[in-house]
Amino acid sequence: MFKYTALCVALFAPLSVYAATDEDSRAVREQIQQLKESDEQRITQMEQRLQQAESNSRNAEAQQTSHSVANSESSFNPAIALILSGTYGQLQQDAAIPVTGFAMSPPNNTGFTKGFSLGESELGIAANIDPQFRGVTTFSLAAAGGVSVENGFVQTSALENGFNLKFGRYFSGLGYLNEQHSHTWDFADQPLVYRVLWNNQLGEDGVQLKWLAPTDMFVEIGGELGRGLDFPGTNNQKNGSGAEVLFAHVGDDIGIENSWRAGASLHETKRENAVSTGVPDLLNTAGGVSDSFSGDSNTAGLDFVWKYSPNGNIRERYLKLQGEYFHRTESGLLTYDFTAPGVIPVGKNITDSYAVTQSGWYLQSVYQFMPNWRTGLRYDQLDSGIASVGATIANRVISNYAFNPSRITWMADYNPSEFTRIRLQLAHDNSRQGLPDNQLFLQYIVTMGAHGAHQY
């Protein structure tokens, strides 16, 4: 019996092993087949995704090529704005009479006349050129005819570490009001100090570099190298720069209702044969004489702005207080022209030393007391200084006018939208000695087209 059992075990044991082996083999083959099918499915999906990606890439390249061709021809679409303004002036004195004590300044550039007049119109064009640069151009359309380039500059948009570069023609960054275009002024005209020291506004051909600090408080530092295009510079053709500017501004918010900004500026330039016609002299020459000045002109300035709005809602109500002070020193040579008619002896000029320190300031406040309505008050004053004049011309040139020009101005304006402003302005102008002037102005300003945000 034992032998029979052992024989059965010996005969059937291999068969059970073989059976187990076949089942394992089948299981392995099935797993292999599943893996093959799964891999083939994944490969098919990947091939389809690759084909789709290649198709999308071809479409994108075709679309980009189409856009490039279109951009190069007609699809470049800059922002365009046209600003129109006009004024009615009721004056007691001729607006062209210069401010007393600033004879070497340009003619009295008030920007207005008696009666109805079309003010300066502006045509502005601005656009991003590419990811690195932005371009801005403003054409000034004079009421009497003629077109000039007021601004025309390229500005970087991709410099790192807070730097920004501007080159071309621009309004200088000195002070507070200087960079603002006339249609954004809170009054119909500039303060007296801007009129006599900057001929209303300092423009420059050159390069400007600004740095904005990476701080919670607003900190901005900038510098400019320019041609010396506008007064007090002299627009001469020469190598190098004719004027330099440094400025710095700081500011911050106080809660949600208050904000402020303060700044300081320095401007240096040289004046060469800067002629001023009709300069009054001690000899009382009819029509004055024609003097010319050559020398250094250095100006320092301070500016401050504070704004308050209840609950931070500037659309309803706000109050703005601002002021600026400028201090200019000029020193060089003054040529007294004896060639003017009626002056004896004829044909002889005298040149001698000349130096003077002059200054001016203004303080103004604007209050929006309800939506769309504002009112404002401004006071400005000048100090013509006492000139130091060489001995050979001391008895001919007025060195001390003993008069401080001043003016007080009130305005109210209605702004139905950000594109329209209608203004009434009254002023008592005491800037011409012995010629007080009560002035009334009605002004409209309208903007058509794109309208960018105004500066702080």
Image (cartoon, rainbow, N blue to C red):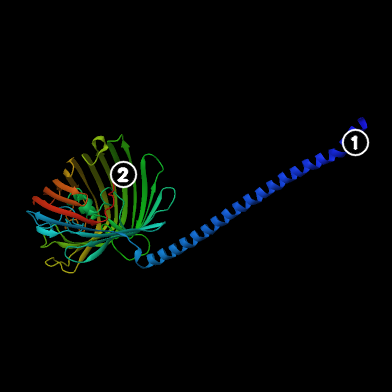
Does residue 208 appear in this view?
A: yes
Q: Observer-nearest residue: 421 or 192?
A: 421
**Against 271, is 218 above or below?**
above
Q: Where does residue 399 sit, x and y in percent of width and height? A: 18, 52
Q: Observer-nearest residue: 30 or 233?
A: 30
- The mark closer to the camera, 1 or 2, is 1
Q: Where does residue 180 sit, x and y in percent of width and height? A: 26, 51
In this rendering, position of residue 453 left or right of residue 117: right
In this rendering, position of residue 189 left or right of residue 50: left
**Against 24, is 285 above or below?**
below
Query: Residues under labels 1 and 2: Cα distance?
Result: 113 Å
Q: Residue furthest left?
A: 92
- Where, quadrant-wise, is the N terminus in this rendering? top right
Dot 2 crowding, Cα within 10 Å, few <14, some 14–19, many 20+:
many
Say which residue label 2 marks.
263
Type of amino acid under label 1: Leu
- Where, quadrant-wise, is the C terminus in this rendering? top left
- Answer with mark 1 or mark 2, whichever residue precedes in sequence: 1
**Against 357, is 58 above or below?**
below
Q: Residue furthest top?
A: 1
Type of amino acid under label 2: Gly
Q: Where does residue 266 sit, x and y in percent of width and height? A: 32, 49
Dot 1 crowding, Cα within 10 Å, few <14, some 14–19, many 20+:
few
In this rendering, position of residue 237 left or right of residue 92: right
User: Circles 1 and 2: CB distance less than 8 Å?
Assistant: no
Say which residue label 1 marks.
7
Q: How many marks?
A: 2
